[in-house]
Amino acid sequence: MKFTYYGHATFLVDVQGKKILFDPFFNGNPLANAALADTIEADFIFVTHGHGDHVSDLASIAKRTGATVVCAAEIAGWLGNQGVTNTLPMNHGGFIQFPFGKAKGVNAVHSSSLPDGSNGGNPMGFVFNTEEGDFYIAGDTALTMDMQLIPLWAKLSFAVLPIGGHFTMDVADAVHAAKFAQVDKIVGVHYDTFGYIKIDKEAALSAFAAAEKTLLLPDVGITIEL
Ligand code: NI
Ligand code: MN
């Protein structure tokens, strides 16, 4: 599996020959190369929730690429109003079959309104089972006991966890989350974009190392093999 980071909580996972883009936020993202909004390719776009820092380029990229957008039913409705029709509305629940494997929506403790103020449904994370490995995308969330359920569904090769604090888990809680989810390799996201979520990267790396976990903080634009 290949993971490419675009800054904040925007990234792409390449698995089983499919490109899965998450939470496209290029325009307005101080860490991102905004021009990528016009060129990035995707087969699927998974959306964790409706906040502006997760959907700013969602409709335009969905229309240009024709990618299937997998998201809360409420977000699918909002996209439909903008002419995006290739959506797969879903919610927290059972596994859904895709060409690259299976995925399910899981709890995220956060909120989810859309940029026009409409209801974004439940915020969520996603658990993936694929032949190349299992992974967990937490989305914006606080630490929650529900993360202890994840090992029932997946033997995780890696997890993508928010670590910036303030609106989501901070580093200390993300270490607890990694223990709950029984995962040793963590990609940290949702940090350093804005003043509220600036972190000490060295301290973050040390905190995970002390728990015998590996925190990966790829630079923007960098692709890593996971
Ligand atoms: Ni959010
Ligand atoms: Mn966010």
Image: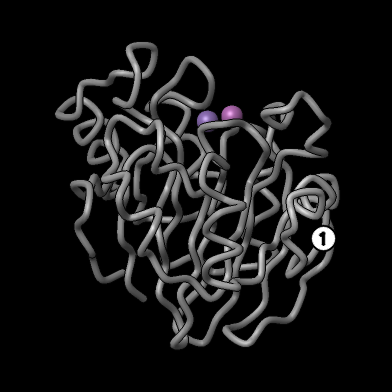
Residue at x-position 72% and y-position 60%: 84
Q: Report the side of 181 relative to 190 (left or right).
A: right
Q: Quadrant of the C terminus?
A: bottom left
Asked whether the viewer can see residue 142, the reply is no
- Residue at the image point whose x is 29% and y is 25% from the top: 192
Q: Quadrant of the N terminus?
A: bottom left
Amino acid at dot 1: Pro
Q: Position of residue 91 (x, y in %)?
A: 83, 53
- x 75%, y 57%: residue: 83
> Residue 4 appears at what percent x and percent y?
30, 61
Residue 133 lies left or right of residue 84; in this view the side is left
Q: Is residue 136 visible?
A: yes
Note whether ligand 1 is within 8 Å of mark 1: no
Q: Report the colour scheme.
A: one colour
Give the total number of marks visible in the rendering. Answer: 1
Dot 1, how many residues are within 10 Å of its Cα: few (below 14), some (14-19), or many (20+)? some
Q: Is residue 76 left or right of residue 222?
A: right
Question: What SS does tag 1 mark?
Answer: strand
Q: Is the residue 42 above or below the residue 175 in the image?
A: below
View extreme (left): residue = 202
Q: Is residue 195 above or below residue 87?
A: above
Q: Quadrant of residue 147?
A: top right
Expressed as whole percent of the image width and height from the top left, the position of residue 30 reads 30, 29
Where residue 85 sits, quadrant-wise, is bottom right
Q: According to the image, label 1 marks what residue?
A: 89
Spot occupied by residue 187 in the image (x, y as percentages of width and height): 34, 49
